[in-house]
Image (spheres, rainbow, N blue to C red):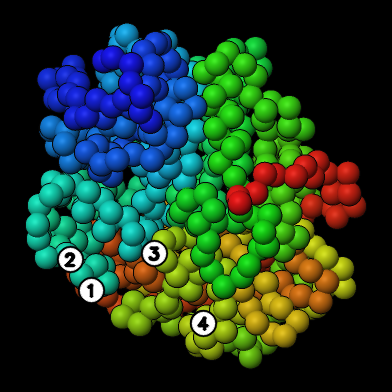
Amino acid sequence: MKNCDCEARSLINTKIRTRDKVELACDVYLPPHEGRYPVILSFSPYNNTGVRSSSGLSWANRGFAFVSADCRGRFNSGGNFTPWINDIEDAYDLLDWIASQKWCNGNIGMQGGSYVGFTQLAAAVSRHPALKAVTPSAIQSDLYAIYYNGGVLALPFMPAWHIGMTQRAGVKAQPPNWEEIIRKTPLSNLDGYAAIPCPSWKKIASHDTKDAYWKKNGIEGRLRDAKVGFFIQNSWYDHIGAKVFSMFNEIVGSPGFSKSTLKKYTCLRVGPWNHGVNMKEGDLDYGPDAMVAEEVEVDFLSSILGGKEPKTARNPSRIQIFVMGANKWRFENEWPLKRTQWTPFYLGSSGHANTSNGDGWLSRDKVEIKKCTPDTFTSDPRNPVPTCGGRGVGNSGQRNQSEIEKRKDVLVYTLPQLTEPMEVTGPVSVKLFVSASTPDADFAVKLVDVYPDGRPFNVCDGILRARFRGGLDKKPELMKPGTVYELDFELDVTSYLFKSGHRVRIQIAGSNFPHFSRNPHTGRKAGIETKMRKSVQKIYHSSEYPSCIILPLIPIHSNLSARAVPIPVAP
């Protein structure tokens, strides 16, 4: 291709043959003048070819080649698309083709979020020598945790996305009514109700245990062998974000990390967003500093591909977190923080903690009474507690919980008004002593911030299906009705400042739908069950059964010297 007086040169709908003879489609954008350039790759299932790419033009103007490619089975690429399958091999073959082109100088970086972030992780796992840096956002490496939380299938986004993505792009059909479909049973037949046959969905709905299926198809544990620099971004309210710290720790904890040429530049930024950087959700405003500019990511790629040290290497530390409530960015050295004070807050009541008008309370002191009346609620899968905020796509983020706390099937425990600020940063977990009238039951827990005017806003939440109390990768064990069991599980991670005059609260319920699928309470797997029944569930709190929430408290005085460095904000 000759030099030209234009914005960029382009090669449209170029075909690349993979090792199994599937043709991947890509568009190539090049600077106006011939030469060998570093390359930025976007490998996506979301119609990446055949349309004018503003990103491609921007990178060409910076002196980079830009390649946008469709995943196999999507849009202009051949083959069939099954999420999470083939991406490692396809990414390697794509990188191999790019590296062999006369316009490539042998240095390739990648960018993008969500599934486009996953293809970067897959490319990093492929260990192609030309790949030098990746900037994945809105993604994590634990595939099981993308679909399941505490053994409970996540709805409604994941089935709609997964099943819809396997339909050949361009097929014209009546869009499924997913709001109706996710209420149907069994869960393994949601593809049938959508009239989009999807064998891979049936497998996902039937593998509620973190078993060999997930280990075979996932990349968790494989990033430690990658050789590239990672600039990872995620969010406190992204439905694919709870395990991003685990992924980060896997990378920086790999052998020889500090001496690696490129991997040593790895860093992480977590903001108060939804499924994507700067994507706002919820009722609260975190101020102008919550929005960040693209320039840090651009510099990371540009510098590493140009053989230079990125600006992030001069940051005080590798981790940047946005502390909600304080609404400030802060740098930290590790996760969880070494200065964490793991503090239990114990549940108590006179047996009537139902609704926010009940008698439930929280205390730093253990309950001294040996026996007390447990709190009881009836969980009805036909009338589940509706989702209000949390991680997700739509109806997510921090939202007013007032209507939720009016329900009799929601227990509420509240700490007295704070006389000084209290920061919670890290993994939040609970220890609950419970029983149920059914062979299985779910326990959904929320951490809540109650404002001085009485408005309650969720901070983070989680759920556990009781059959998985021994571990998500262990053989499930049903409950014996009426028997008291101890449940220990992590809700989520967060960084949040409860201000003086606010109150800390937790909610406990038997459902959080449609964020999580309903427990049929029959003892059969939810993926295949069609029948449902009510469950009478109890929470015990006494000296014998010290139910509590364990908060990772960060001493406020220790943050006075914290590394608060201005973050470039979006214009």
In this view, the mark in front (1 or 3): 1
Task: Give 310 or 407, whichever is nearer the viewer.
Answer: 310
Q: Quadrant of the N terminus?
A: top left
**Chain-order first, disc 1 or disc 3:** 1
Residue density around tag 3, few if under 14, some if 14–19, many if 20 or more, within 10 Å: many
Q: Residue at x 29, y 40 (%)?
A: 52
- Type of the residue with mark 4: Ile
Q: Residue at x 88, y 44 (%)?
A: 561
Q: Position of residue 304 (x, y in %)?
A: 56, 19
Q: Position of residue 437 (x, y in %)?
A: 41, 76
What is the number of the mark on residue 69? none
Q: Secondary structure at mark 3?
A: loop
| 305 w.r.t. 203: above or below | above
**Chain-order first, disc 4 or disc 2:** 2
In this view, the mark in front (4 or 1): 1
For marks 1 and 3, give the CA distance.
Answer: 15 Å
For marks 2 and 3, give the CA distance.
Answer: 20 Å
Residue density around tag 2, few if under 14, some if 14–19, many if 20 or more, within 10 Å: some
What is the number of the mark on residue 176? 2
